[in-house]
Amino acid sequence: MKCNIKSNIKKFKMRRGFSIIEVLVATFLLSIVVALPLADVFIRTNFRIRRMQKALAMERDLVEKIKALPYNSPYLLDDGDGNDLDSTMHPDRFVDSLKLNSMSIKRVYNIADGVPAAGMKTVKVFVIWRDPKVDTFTHILSSVTIKNARW
């Protein structure tokens, strides 16, 4: 059996794979193509989380202020319509509105006297904002029950 060295070298050269440089360049280009859309998703998610944290902080602030009010405070008077506790369109009290990075946030609350029992009030707090990207309104709801100290 005779072995021809020149023909073996030609076969080896024809069957060779990719060089390490070619593999590194392809990996680098692929990582750029994959990383750019992911970075956009991460940035949007981070922005949504920051908006939600700001709205939650505003909600907690308003709930604490309401809890500190006395039972007979003028800020805790029901407007007479006891069926509007869940209504965000016609709230009993409008607290404030502010603009935060193209997002307008407003805080409102509704009061129901005698709910869940006589001598008690239920207050529902809403923090409402409009998401400009999807053109929808989102809100956070919190409910507080206040008991008359005399009961």
Image: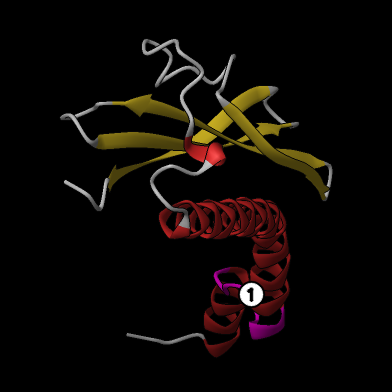
Residue at the image point whose x is 37% and y is 13% from the top: 82
Amino acid type indicated by mark 1: Val
Residue neighbourhood size for the residue with mark 1, other residues' Cα within 10 Å, grouped as few (<14), some (14–19), many (≥20): few
- The front one of 19 and 25 is 25
Quarter holding the N terminus? Answer: bottom left
User: In the picture, residue 49 is in which quadrant?
Assistant: bottom right
* Secondary element at tag 1: helix
Q: Is residue 3 left or right of residue 104?
A: left
Q: Position of residue 18 (x, y in %)?
A: 62, 73
User: In the picture, residue 122 is in which quadrant?
Assistant: top left
Residue at the image point whose x is 72% and y is 57% from the top: 36
Residue highlighted by disc 1: 23
Relative height, residue 58 to residue 23 (above, below): above
Considering the whole magenta stretch, tell me its main secondary structure.
loop
User: In the picture, residue 131 is in which quadrant?
Assistant: top right
Residue at the image point whose x is 15% and y is 30% from the top: 117
Q: Is residue 3 left or right of residue 118?
A: right
Q: Is residue 80 magenta?
A: no
Q: Position of residue 75 (x, y in %)?
A: 55, 39
Residue at the image point whose x is 33% and y is 26% from the top: 113
Relative height, residue 71 to residue 38 (above, below): above
Q: Position of residue 140 (x, y in %)?
A: 47, 39
The color scheme shown is secondary structure
Q: Position of residue 58 (x, y in %)?
A: 59, 55
- The front one of 55 and 78 is 78
Q: Provide the residue span drawn in magenta.
A: 15-21
Relative height, residue 38 to residue 71 (above, below): below
- The front one of 38 and 51 is 51
